[in-house]
Every structure is written in structure tokens, then in C-alpha cells.
Amino acid sequence: MLAPKRWPALLLALFLLSLISEPSAAKNIFGVVVDKQSGKPIENANIFLVGSNAGTTSDSTGFFAIPNVTESESRVTASFIGYETRTVDGLPSGVIKDNVIILEMEPTLVKLPQVTIEENRFVESALNSTDGFMAKKVKTTQVQNAVGAMDDVIRYYSVFAAIQQKTDLNSLLYIRGGSPDQNLVLIDDVPIFNPYAMRISLGGAISLVDNDLLNSAEMLDSGFGARYGNRLSSIINISYKEGSREKFHSESNLNVTAGNVSVQGPFAKGKGSFIASLGASYFDFLVEQTGARDVSVLIPKRRQVHGKVVYSFNESNKLSLLFINGKEETGVKDYRPENLTLDSDSHTRIASVRHQVVLNPQTFVSTSLSYYRDRNHLQFFDNGNIFHGGELAFHTTSRNLREEITWSPMKTTRFVVGSELNSSTEYLAWAVSWRSNVELPIDIDFRGEERQYAFYAENSTNVKENTTITIGLRKSVTRNFKPSVLSPRLRIENRLSDKILLSASWGVYHQFPSMFSTVLRGVPIDISKNYASLKPEKAKYVDLSTQFFPAQNFSVTLSGYHKSLSDLLIADEQRIYIADNIGSGYANGLEFQLRGVSGLWDKLSFYLAYAYANARYKTGKSQWTYFDHDRRHSLSCSFNVNVSTSLSVDGQWRFGSGFPYTPIVGYLYSPDSWQADPDGWVLVKGQKNSQRLPPYQRLDFRVSYKSHIGKIKTGFYFELVNILNIRNIFFYDWNLNADGPADYAIEKTPIYMMPFMPMAGSRFEF
């Protein structure tokens, strides 16, 4: 058997051999989609291979790429509402310039009820992303093939150096100095307050997004427009795909922990389509069969159903229905390492209806109504002492109504006005009494109702054909927090040349207090005791970015940002973590990204990113303190090698400087303190976040193989996560141990992140 230490050398040898092997019949197709009349690039055009399910969409520069294409499936089709569909031959000929296909699309006539118009591209852009070229966009195939992402789109975003995870055991993201509760996640315009699955057992190991339904996702970590509110850090805008309107199609995928089956197809003679997915975990069953009960507490039983139904009344009038139902359970009667009994369950239900209609050549209207319900419950106790235990119940119900009108009086100007109403109820109950001190609030009992109204307006204007200026204003009003708040936004984008893009943005953002912050802030915080006296947190954001293309198939992105924070909710540890708006802070940083496809028969693509960040806060006149999630340096490197039409190799290496932590410097006897352990001892903390954990490193490899069995497309992968088995430290667990009646010692135990882990999976398309 090969020693683990020799695995990296073997994989490196395989990688080098793949670079010098003979070129295969497979090629990569690169192209640009442009308006034939104006020559301007068309963003979000649908690109696919004729007779295949492979496809992608064009980016903000009109560029697209499709890897591993054989001559038998090389015909490329581009479609976009408002334009005639275009098909060309992608490999032998086609309309090719400098090895790049130029797809010129003609504007078409769209028939509306009792009127015929020439479709305006600004109107159609309301159906697609208009949030600038700096949005971090992800497609389904990227997530499916990404090493270390576990087929999860939110986990995938950790490939970007500026996006952090405090532990690779969960998918909670810390973005540009912000905490997980400051990220707004949307699925088809539905706000998802808690987007994480496996919450109780693994703290949110993956997201609840179903990758089989994923069409695309984009992250906006700066400059997001006035339609987005009530978050300080970022927007993750996820869209589910529509089912096929031509034929029935099904897929299934299996890995070592779970399986998933999806089906899609047309109805009403192609006017409508549906897509649905059913997923379930079974690793808990496998573990139970082996008798390894001590492991089963970490793996919940998970079931989920996702679906989307779309019906087009005509070419300009569409209705969409979305539904999600997910449930998790974990139950262990005798978890021997901790000698405890644990029961937990979570249940999420989401439903929405969205109507989109083009009223006339200049006006597009979108209306959406959504319902979100989330129930979580956890109970545990010490088998040796039933008075040591804890209970958590967290319930959220939300109803959201959004109306948005896009009006384009000219091809160079677009106005967006909208309103949003959100009505929510929250319930949080928490109580804990453990055998040792737990750094959490002792008890929380909160029930609240909230209504938020928002009104927003935004104008985008093209100036001299190469500059776009977007100005927006959002006003938010709540029932519980006075007064209302105004959030102005500004973004300027300039196409300096065909190879250089510039972007500058400034904005003011607010986030109202919520029980959601208590659960996902990432640090102990209790806002139940003084909820009525709190204010919204505030951030002022400036971002400067440029993207340029030094050579064919290469892009470089440079970004710098500064975020000024005020009215931050900071917990007072002396008051049992009761929080108040006593904090101010800042976050700034520099980011570098390089993407490319080499000339080695277009086999090798790579991504390199580095980020420098600095995030601190203070209360009153106290000294500046690093946020718990402050990471000064981050580096990410990844590559993909298409060895042949069927075989590909992926790798990724990540490095991050250590997160801050607070050391323990002593102990004292204070039995009346709420921080005392059962014996009356209190650990004395040193300066807050004055020391740092060791650096984080992880190297992953993945080998993927795809083939055909008759008409069935198959895919298999084998993945090695943390192949060097580096013991990255999540945090230190501090305890006071007695060596004798009067001899105590402080014990510092590291708690580690994900160890070396082999993974495998398969995918079948029918």
C-alpha cells in the first residue's frame, strides 16, 4: 500500500504527465456574444451545444467558454430574449477570429398582446443580472466539478481568497470583515434567513441549495444596488433553472453520504415546464450498521424536496412557482465520548410565486410573493447528571412581497422603482447548565413580531457608450425601530478600452437587529433583554476595482475597499453577553485575482488569488480590537487539466494566516460569578483577540471521469480532501484540571478542523 506521504508526489507526477501527453480530440470552445448592430457585448446569453446538455452563459464582456468539446458535438447555439437565436460550428470553422468565436446576434421582434415591438435590451436586462462586472458569478458545472466544494454553491465561494471560513467543517462565510448573518441569500428572489443545512450536528456543513436545480449564482460583495437591503456585507443571489420545454430528462447522483434524483420536462405543449429534485442522506444508516455509534451524532438524517414550475402565457408573460421542503433529525441516546444524550430536529418550508410581464417596449414588471418557515429544536443532557444539559428552540416565519417596475425610455437609460414588505415572527428560547463553563448566554426567551417596509429607486445611464452610472436610494421603515433609514448607492463603470474595465462604488447600508444575528453572528450575543432600545447597524462602503485582459484567455482583477462601521452590536461579557449599539469599526483590504487558460492544447486552466484584509472594532474610547474573523493574508491556487475528452484532474491549495483568539492567563475562585464552573473556579482572560492561531493550509485533489453507457451519460469522481492531513486548529478549548487538592493547572486543548478525507461520487443523466 502506498504511504500517505508519497501521495502528493504521485499526483504531481500524474499532473506533469498529463501536460506532456499527446493532445486529445477534445477542445475548448471560446467565444464572444455581441449585438450585430451596435457591436456591444451581450451578457447572460444562453450558450449550449446542439444535441448535448453542456452549456453556459456569457459574462459581462460577452465572453464564454465550454471545455472538453468533441467535433461530433461542436455546434454552438446562442439565445437571448429580444434576439434571434444563432447557431455556428464551433471547432472546424464558424465565425472565428484569433481562435475565438464571434457570435453576432440580430435584434428580433417580440409579439405582445395587441402590439408589436422591437425588444429593448434594457427591458430584458431586468430578467438578468445588472449588478456590474465585479459580481462573482458561478454556474452549475463549476460547482459540480469543483474540488472541495461538496457540490455546494455556497461552499464553492471559499475558493475566492477574500471570502473566509472560520472552519472548513461548515459553510458559513465571512466576507470582507462581515459575519455570516450580514450576508443576504436569495433563491429566485426569496430571502433565505438561514440558508444552512446540517445545522445542529455540524453547525451548517452545507447549504440548503440544491445543485441539481442551480442555474447560476452571483455574489455581490460591494456596490450592490438599492433593491437589496437589511444587510451590511454581501448578497448571494441564486437562481434555479427552468425545466426543459422540449423533452423529459432525469439525473441522479450518489456519493458516500447522500443521494439525489431530479426529473424535468414540458407540459401544456411546451408552454410550461417543471423540474423537481428529491434528496436524502444515508450515511447515518451505514454508520449504524457498523456499530460505530460514537460517530452517528455528527451525521443527521436529512430529506429534502426542491421544485420549480414555470408557465408562459405568451412570449412576454411568465409565471413561476418555487417550493422547498427540508427536514433533518439527529438522535443519540448514549454518545460515549461526551456521555450525553442528544435529540434535535430542523424543518424548513419555502414557497413562492413570481409573475414577470413585459407591458410595452419600455416597461417590465416583476411581482413576487414568498413564504418562509424555519423550525429548529435541540435538547441534550449529561447521562450522569440530568441537571447538566441544555435546550434550544429557534423558530422563524416570514412573508415577503416585492413589486418592481423597470422602465427604459431610451436605450441608454433605465429606471427601476420598487417596494418590499416583510412581515416576520421570531421565537428563540435557550437555556444551558453544563458541567463546565460554556461561553454562551445562560438563558434567552424571546418572542417578537416585526414589519419592515422598503421603497427604492435606481437609475442607470450609459454615458458616451463606454460609461455606466447607476444611482440608487433605498428607504426602510420598521415597526419596532425608529426612525426610518435612508441608504444611498452609487456605482460607476467604465470600459476604458477593449481590454480594461474600471469600477467605483460607494454606498450606505443598514441592518436591523434580529434573532437571526443571535444564531449566526459567529460570536455569543444576546439581544433579547434590550431589543426595543436597539438601533440598526450601519456601514459606509467604498470600492475601487479594475479588470484587464493582458493576453488572450487571461484576466486580472484588482480591488481595494474600505468599510466604515457604526452602531455595531457588541456583546458585554460582564453582562452575560447582552449586546448594545456601542461599537464602531472598519474593514479594509486589497484583492488580486488571475484567471487563465494555457496554450497547452487548451488543456490547462488555472485561478490564483491573494487578499490582504484588516478588520477591527472598538467600544467608546477603548483600544482597537481585531474581529474574531480577521484574517490578514489569504492565498488560493487552483487548476484544472483536461487530460482527454473523458478524464480531468483538478487541484486546489489554500493558505490563510491565523484567526485571532483570546488567551487564558490565570484563574480565580469566584463561586458567585455566572462564569464559574461547578466547582466555583473562573478562568481569567487576557487581552481580547491578542493572539493568533497557527496558519491554515489545505491541499485537495480530484479526478473526474465521464462516459456513456448507451444513451445514458455517466460521470464518476474520486476526491482527496486535505491530502497532506494538516491538523488545522479551529479553536482552543480551555479547562482547569486539578492535579491535587490544591494544585490546579490550565489545560489548553486544540480542536481541529477537517482531517484527511477521501470522497467519491457518481452522476447519471437519462
Image (cartoon, helix red, strand yellow):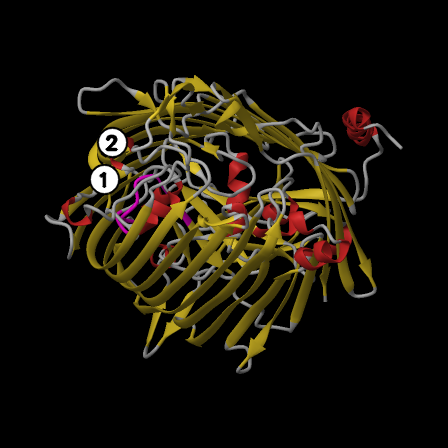
Residue at the (42%, 32%) spot, across then down:
679
Q: Report which quarter residue 650 is drawn in.
A: top right
**Does any portion of residue 235 appear in the rendered image?**
no
Q: Quadrant of the C terminus?
A: bottom right
List the residue tagged with mark 2: 565
In the image, residue 186 lies at what x, y percent? Answer: 40, 54
Q: Secondary structure at mark 2?
A: strand
In the rendered image of this protein, does residue 493 appear above or below residue 315? above
Horizontally, residue 408 falls left or right of residue 220, namely left
- Real-space Cα distance between discs 1 and 2? 8 Å
Looking at the image, the residue that sits furthest to the bottom is 268
Looking at the image, the residue that sits furthest to the front is 741
Residue at the (34%, 44%) spot, across then down:
442
In the image, residue 601 lies at what x, y percent? Answer: 74, 34
Amino acid carrying mark 2 in the image: Leu
Q: Earlier in the sequence, mark 1 or mark 2?
A: 1
Looking at the image, the residue that sits furthest to the right is 1
Q: Secondary structure at mark 1?
A: strand
Q: Report which quarter residue 554 is drawn in.
A: top right
Q: Quadrant of the N terminus?
A: top right
Q: In the rendered structure, which segment of residues is drawn in magenta? A: 226-236
Q: Residues within 10 Å of mark 1 (few under 14, many from 20)?
A: many
Residue at the (34%, 50%) spot, across then down:
516
Horizontally, residue 395 falls left or right of residue 298, namely left
Amino acid carrying mark 1 in the image: Glu
